[in-house]
Image (spheres, grey):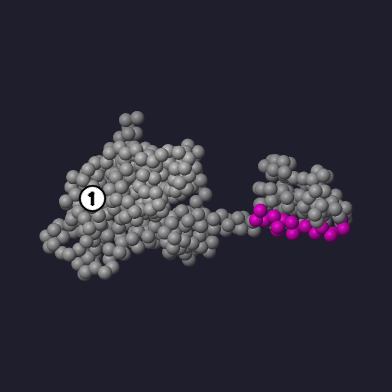
Amino acid sequence: MYEKMKLSWFSNLKGDTLAGIVVALALIPEAIAFSIIAGVDPKVGLYASFSMAVIIAFAGGRPGMISAATGAMALLMVTLVKEHGLEYLLVATLLTGVLQIAAGYLRLADLMRFVSRSVVTGFVNALAILIFMAQLPELTGVTWHVYAMTAAGLGIIYLFPYVPVIGKTLPSPLVCILVLTGVYLATGMDIRTVGDMGELPDTLPVFLWPEVALNLETLMIILPYSVMLTVVGLLESMMTATIVDDLTDTGSDKNRECKGQGLANIGTGLLGGMAGCAMIGQSVINIKSGGRTRLSTLIAGVALLMMVVFLADWVSRIPMAALVAVMIMVSIGTFSWTSIRDLRKHPLSTNLVMLATVVVTVGTHNLAIGVFVGVLLAALFFANKVGNILYIGSEEADEGSRRIYRVVGQVFFASSERFAAAFDFKESVEKVTIDLSRAHFWDITAVQALDRAVIKFRREGTEVALIGLNEASATIVDRYAIHDDPEAVEKLMGGH
């Protein structure tokens, strides 16, 4: 138990501490921006980022992953806040937490196995593009000082690791923020700072029970929003966990992560924060800055609160150009550049799934819709591919009085028409044998196709024998087939 705790918390003290501080600094302007998007006070997003990070550090299933207030969740809250106010948002956040915990116990995270690698790649690329696009407002209509500071920040981020000794000791994003802040304080140049984003809170969060009547009417108002928040939150968290798994070459408990996200959202709602989820950008910053264990996530949350409450005067002076440089680094590091090279090597269907996921996600700014489209396309392409792997050959036997059909492949909804079209129902033979020993029947549509083939042959006066059904296929055929039930056959063919 001690060794497990040490590995999860204290095996990377320096790396986790420094990475947590970098993440906290990068979280501040994003939390404020997401609060503005949702139409709430900046402290709502900042308190949410603090509580989400702290709670998920203990309850989550993916060490080193950062959860906080996010843009995807903020977009879903706009209408609720506008029409009903902050109190209803807090109740919706609590219900979101309950639904996410239920999803964890129902093991809905196991559905992630249906998300193909091409969808994950498209999701990653789309998120990288969205992260970069989110920085553009800070780079348009500004003075040359901003471009110079941003370029200098990127130079520090990418070149500092090559500095002997110290380059491997300190995370370059932290050095970038400290150096550019020092330059800003020394020169007093006219550029935007964190303080220009919004007012930072000056008090610690307190327990806050929403002042809303807990009745059916309230439930009907918040339920649609909570369901959307639950789906988007879990989807983004599961995708982020998968990406962090790849970056760290370690596994994680996705169902525990669902429960952890739920607990974090309940805690957030009770502290006056908005619903949140895992953040891929901040998680990538954490990993690339050296964070690996739960301690990095905890420090990120605690450091965020300490900075905005007790060090607000200093934090407010951090130039936005420094944080823009860090986020551009994140977008460059997040994008899967090999996916561009692989476009020439991968099948067209794989490329289409990846590109569709990117286009829809970027076009709608909705991660859930993008992933849904990607998964749907991947399923359709897969069904079409498997449906084409069907061969039906035939040969005469018993001097032309019997024909043997040999079915090879998968019979299901996508291949049922090919199966039915392979038989010659007008051929004058006494007996037809359908050899199914190398075939597999998957669904009701396949069974109905077999029913129709057998019934049509018998209607032409031909005796039909089915041989070789494997145990699984025989089970579904015996259960749902009707070709040996005269009444059911009459009912089926009555309208034809």
Q: Amino acid at mark 1?
A: Leu
Q: Choose top left, top right, bottom left or bottom right for residue 400.
A: bottom right
Residue 265 placed where, x, y %?
37, 42
* Depth order, front residue of 269/316: 269
* 442 lies left or right of 116: right
* Residue nearer the viewer, 345 or 223: 223
Q: How many marks?
A: 1
Main secondary-structure element of the magenta-colored stretch: loop
Which residue is rendered at x = 70% and y = 41% of the image?
A: 475
Assess whether residue 417 is covered by the magenta stretch: yes
Within 10 Å of disc 1 (Cα), the crowding (few <14, some 14-19, many 20+) is many
Q: Residue furthest top?
A: 1
- Position above or below: 297 against 341: above
* Rendered-image quadrant of the N terminus: top left
492 or 166, which is in the foreground?
492
Q: Is residue 153 left or right of residue 222?
A: left
| Residue to which mark 1 is pinned | 200
Residue 257 in the magenta stretch? The answer is no
Residue 122 place in picture, x, y as percent: 45, 58
Q: Position of residue 485 (x, y in %)?
A: 81, 43
323 with respect to 344 (left or right): left
Indicate the quadrant where residue 328 lies: bottom left
Q: Quadrant of the C terminus?
A: bottom right
Front position in the image: 492 or 297: 492
Residue 418 visible within the image: yes
Name the residue at 17% across, 51% down. Answer: 314
**Position in image of residue 420 (x %, y %):** 74, 56
State the extent of the magenta-drawn residues as a range.
Answer: 413-431
Residue at 33% in and 45% down:
273
Q: Answer yes or no: is residue 27 visible.
A: no
User: Tag 1, which secondary structure?
Assistant: loop
